[in-house]
Amino acid sequence: MEPPFTDAEGNLSSRPVFRDGRPVESREAVARRDELIERLASLPPVPGALDQIVQRFGTDIVAEVTGRSRRVVRRGDRLAVEHRAASANLAETAAFMDDAKRVLVFSEAGGTGRSYHAELSARNRRLRVHYLLEPGWKADAAIQGLGRTNRTNQAQPPLFRPIATDVKAEKRFLSTIARRLDTLGAITRGQRQTGGQGLFRPEDNLESHYARDALRQLYLLLVRGKVEGCSLQIFEDATGLKLMDANGIKDELPPITTFLNRLLALTIDLQGLLFTAFEQLLDAKVEGAIASGVYDIGLETLQAESFVVTNRSSIYTHPATGAETRLLTIIGRRRNRPMTLEHALDYLADAWAVLLLNERSGRAAVQIPAPSVMLDDGEIERRVRLIRPMEHHHASMKIMDESHWQPADRETFAAAWNGEVVDVPEFAESTLHIVAGLLLPIWKRLPNDSTRVYRLQTDEGERIIGRRVSPDWAANACATATCSLTPHEAFSALMEGRTVLDLAEDLQLRRVRVMGAHRIELSGFTDAMRDRLRAYGLFSEIISWKLRMFVPTDGTGAAVLAKVVDRYPVARIGEREAT
């Protein structure tokens, strides 16, 4: 080969050398090529995933529905080529559904038009654990394959398990499937996770608004040089994406889809580095949304020690089919798990943690630092977090300075904390109102503040799936008096914060937040009512030079509320956003 040279465009190049019309080969290069070929030829063949499964478990256990006419199988200590008839797919499907074979492997080519769910009429009604081994490039094909093991008239739904290697870009395709399943769930059930069947975690959808926020944060870190191992120049050269212009960072940064597609062209090391940084930011976004209570988790399974249906009412009957929409009143019993003193004292590992005692109520709390927030006027509000035996909440430093919380020594704090823990009842009861059954005809009549769907299982084994509604909506939806609120239901509804009770003589009950704690306040009372209300069990406080009266929120609250409602009947049940 001639010596290298530079062409007109400045590129380094070379030309082959010919002698008598034949190219001149380098003996060293030829020797190295032949040695490499011999080494490759001496390596044992690596079977594909399908062959590994068939050879590992055997054809007596594995039913293969792929459309292959030949396959390599293991017979004793050797491998042999087996020819398969055109009707093999039908026979293999029948063997799996009849429980003659425990494992089924199917592909897009061999699985067209077939179902593999735990059908009630089939002998094999075992739980299907569906492994998505090769999602491929088309999300539609993968979704269609997932649907073959999840159909109607089945004994139980399947468990989906996606499989991926440590190549980060492979998650790009799983993300597309997750997004499509999320969309399918939103269309079919009015919420998201139903379509995904719990297959993906929240952070697996790489095209959600949480992912977009995380990507923008990643771009800012790249511009500032905060991503270890990848500078801005390396990122722009490898991906071809430009984050800066003459005025600084661009206003229109590359979208999430472009970023994910460019990851596919990167080296494995750089791909893993960028994707790891992106995943960490995405996890933080999702965890922050869940912690703050603003994350929509879609279908939620309610869990408790006990669920008992106390009332069933039909609120709609379809004229053609006779299908009913039912309003269920359910009592849920949950075990209280207060924080122990040892766990509370563990917060003292933080040098800024302070043990507090409320001089007025005698309650104990641990104060730890909390992130500051920016108010609408641009002012920074410093906040702390108060840890209590059964709850925790944030409070501004300004409120804390004006409160009755004072530092306490360890012994005084321990006595007050343990006293509160002992007073916590073992169980707490709450009332749920679930609209189940035929939902589509009355969907627009249901509250539009939340379209989340809940599911639970009662003590008698009944599975309930439906929309949760507020107590006031439930009371107004029923035409009979049997659906009126009981004192316990009214107390639970008020504590949830979505219900306002208007009583006789212009009285009103609603949940308010006072000194960081939720209370039930009675407003509209006159001076002549004070002594009677105190006799019923209400207590009063002067706050900002105004007398306010509250219903106790402990175990006596429902009984006190019953006395108030008996004397001042409920005139109207209103609904408001929770505070």
Image (cartoon, grey):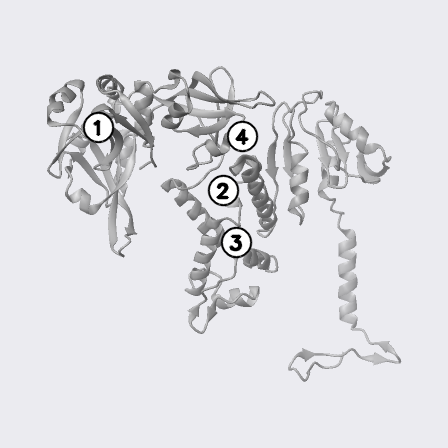
Between the C-alphas of marks 4 and 3, the distance is: 45 Å
Percent across and percent down for residue 46 are 73, 46
Instruction: Name above or below for residue 168 compared with residue 435.
Output: below
Percent across and percent down for residue 482 are 39, 15
Q: Nearer the viewer, mark 4 or mark 2?
A: 4
Which residue is found at the position 13% from the left and 39% from the top? 544
Circle 4 packing at 10 Å, graded few (<14), some (14-19), many (20+), is few
Residue ID for mark 4 = 441
Q: Quadrant of residue 163?
A: top right
Q: Which mark is residue 202?
A: 2
Report if the CB atoms under discs 4 and 2 are less than 8 Å apart.
no
Which residue is found at the position 16% from the left and 22% from the top? 533
Residue ID for mark 1 = 506
Q: Earlier in the sequence, mark 4 or mark 1?
A: 4
Tell me the element at label 4. Answer: helix
Left or right for 415, reference 476? left
Q: Earlier in the sequence, mark 2 or mark 1?
A: 2
The residue positioned farthest toward the bottom in the image shown: 8
Instruction: Name above or below for residue 202 compared with residue 359.
Output: below
Kind of residue indicated by mark 4: Pro
Residue ID for mark 3 = 275
Q: Earlier in the sequence, mark 3 or mark 1?
A: 3
In this view of the protein, which residue sits in the foreground, 466 or 573? Answer: 573
Between the C-alphas of marks 4 and 1, the distance is: 37 Å
Kind of residue indicated by mark 3: Phe
Report if the CB atoms under discs 2 and 1 are less than 8 Å apart.
no
Kind of residue indicated by mark 1: Asp
Percent across and percent down for residue 189 are 54, 34
